[in-house]
């Protein structure tokens, strides 16, 4: 089986891998594997934008710092998915794999499921098979396993086997997250308003796990200097030894080098890469956040 994607050129390819823009995969990786990305829309200070199209992540970080209001995001609609599925069918795709943002934190997965059912109703003659996988996460915890799935498909593995491998990987992917300012993350509900206000007054910074769409505060650190140490020690204690890990930042100049250096010292080898947290993620964390993504214990 070969792959097909209208944006990447080869009409002889027969499958499409689709994900949404919360995957935070760099554009060069998206293009290298022919991954199609459907983008979230968001609003900031009364203006509407499309993630990955209207600005780069570092531009959005600057916009967020200067904004007078908090950003809002909109789910990807059933109609948008149906339109994509019909385009793929017209291209001659035999199989579609869609890997979604955590289903528990967004209606986007449910909209894709409904679009799949509507596609079947409208096009009973089509033999195109649609497989939908819930990533149970966000950002590179969602995106990096998709790259491995593409490699397996490119090597000729079946869609069923690849989907099973993805579900297994997503049951292991973990996210550690911290925000140096709690204004935006308070809005997301990760921290209660009262706790956020108290934290800002007392200089306390929470460190979360964000797995399966559920956030847990696993460490509270007084002062910014202790946050880096807390993040790296938690990484070392929670990750499977020897696996790749990834560092996501809102501001490369402020956070990338020090986190890469500290994580390397803690676990003994550098991150696989440092990436930019995308606009959809920043809309829930604010412009001063860092995430570390890695494989941990199997959660079932």
Image (tube, grey):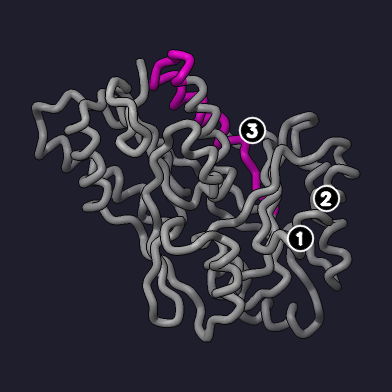
Judged by depth in the image, the label closer to the viewer, 2 or 3, is 2
Judged by depth in the image, the label closer to the viewer, 1 or 3, is 1
Tell me the crowding category of disc 1: few under 14, some 14 to 19, or many 20 or more residues within 10 angstroms, Cα based. some
Whichever of callouts 2 and 3 sits on the residue coming sooner in the sequence is: 2
Whichever of callouts 2 and 1 sits on the residue coming sooner in the sequence is: 2
Q: Tell me the SS state at disc 2.
A: helix
Q: Is the residue 153 above or below the residue 36 in the image?
A: above
**Most foreground residue, 246 or 164:** 246
Quadrant (top left/top right/bottom left/bottom right) for the C terminus = top right
Q: Which residues are magenta?
A: 153-176
Q: Give the distance between the C-alpha atoms of the residues marked 2 and 1, in whole angstroms.
A: 13 Å
Q: Residue at x 63, y 69 (%)?
A: 287
Residue 283: within the magenta?
A: no
Q: Tell me the SS state at disc 3.
A: loop
Q: Give the distance between the C-alpha atoms of the residues marked 1 and 3, in whole angstroms.
A: 29 Å
Give coordinates of residue 206: x percent, y percent: 74, 66
The residue singled out by tag 3 in the image is 298
Using the image, tell me which numbered label, if any, was put on residue 255. 1
Tell me the crowding category of disc 2: few under 14, some 14 to 19, or many 20 or more residues within 10 angstroms, Cα based. many
Q: Is residue 137 visible?
A: no
Q: Is residue 170 visible?
A: yes
The residue singled out by tag 2 in the image is 232
Q: Residue at x 33, y 26 (%)?
A: 10
């Amino acid at each position: 089986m070969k792959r097909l994607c209208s944006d990447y050129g080869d009409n002889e390819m027969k499958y499409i891998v689709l994900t949404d823009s919360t995957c935070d995969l760099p554009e060069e990786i998206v293009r290298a594997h022919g991954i199609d990305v459907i983008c979230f829309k968001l609003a900031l200070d009364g203006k509407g934008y499309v993630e990955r199209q209207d600005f780069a992540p570092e531009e959005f970080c600057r916009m967020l710092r200067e904004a007078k209001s908090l950003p809002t995001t909109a789910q990807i609609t059933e109609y948008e998915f149906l339109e994509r599925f019909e385009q793929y069918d017209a291209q001659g795709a035999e199989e579609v794999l869609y890997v979604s943002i955590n289903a528990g934190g967004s209606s986007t997965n449910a909209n894709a499921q409904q679009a799949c059912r509507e596609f079947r109703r409208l096009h009973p003659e089509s033999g195109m098979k649609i497989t939908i996988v819930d990533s149970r996460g966000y950002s590179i915890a969602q995106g990096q396993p998709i790259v491995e799935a593409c490699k397996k498909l490119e090597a000729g593995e079946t869609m069923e086997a690849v989907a099973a491998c993805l579900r297994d990987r997503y049951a292991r992917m973990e996210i550690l997250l911290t925000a140096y300012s709690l204004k935006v993350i308070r809005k997301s509900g990760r921290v209660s308003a009262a706790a956020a206000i108290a934290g800002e007054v007392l200089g306390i910074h929470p460190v979360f796990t964000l797995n399966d769409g559920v956030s847990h505060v696993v460490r509270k650190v007084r002062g910014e200097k202790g946050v880096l140490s807390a993040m790296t020690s938690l990484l070392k204690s929670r990750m499977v030894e020897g696996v790749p890990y990834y560092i996501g930042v809102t501001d490369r100049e402020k956070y990338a080098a020090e986190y890469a250096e500290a994580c390397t010292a803690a676990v003994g080898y550098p991150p696989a890469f440092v990436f930019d947290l995308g606009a959809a993620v920043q809309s829930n964390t604010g412009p001063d956040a860092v995430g570390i993504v890695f494989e941990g214990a199997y959660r079932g």
